[in-house]
Amino acid sequence: MKKEIKSNRIFIRLNDEELDQIRKSSREAGLSMSAFARKRLLGEKVSARFSEDYLSIKRDISGLCNNVNQIARAVNGKCLAPLPAAEEARVLVQNIYNLMRGGIDHSCK
């Protein structure tokens, strides 16, 4: 696909605070100031990208949920004794709860 050449420009006047706000918002969205301003001027919604902390917690929760699913599958298939599996599931659910509240505990058993 051929990249569209953008050769037209518009000029606007900003005070220091406005410029700082646009810089900050474009950085949070992971866009250049030009791309950010263009999207906003055209009425497109621009959202901040997810932080690395958020993405790390999301990966941790996904992994813990996968573990809970594997335990449930093993118990349902009668591969594990229900009580030890239930205790392991309880620990994993507690870790998920802790992650969601902001306290990361990477010592999953």
Image: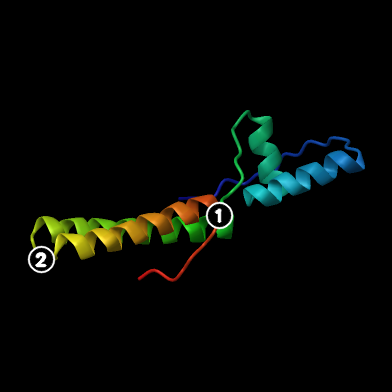
Mark sitting earlier along the chain (2/1): 2
Q: Quick one: label 2, few (<14), some, or many (20+) residues within 10 Å? A: few
Mark 1 and mark 2 in contact (Cβ < 8 Å)? no
x and y, in percent, of residue 58 in the image: 46, 55
Q: Residue at x 22, y 65 (%)?
A: 84
What colour scheme has been applied to the protein in the rendered image? rainbow
Residue 23 appears left or right of 42: right
Which residue shows up at 54% across the image and 58% down it?
Answer: 103
Image position, residue 68 (x, y; %): 28, 57
Which amino acid type corresponds to the residue marked 2 in the rendered image?
A: Cys
The image quadrant of residue 83 is bottom left
For mark 1, give the secondary structure: loop
Q: Which numbered circle lies on residue 14?
A: none
Question: The residue tagged with tag 2: helix, strand or loop?
Answer: loop
| Quadrant the C terminus occupies | bottom left
- In front of the other: 27 or 104: 104
Residue at horizontal 8%, vertical 59%?
77
Note whether residue 70 is visible. no
Q: Quadrant of residue 13?
A: top right
Residue 4 is situated, as x and y percent measured from the top left of the image, at 57, 45
Disc 2: which residue: 79
Q: Which mark is residue 102?
A: 1
Q: CA distance from mark 2 to mark 1?
A: 34 Å
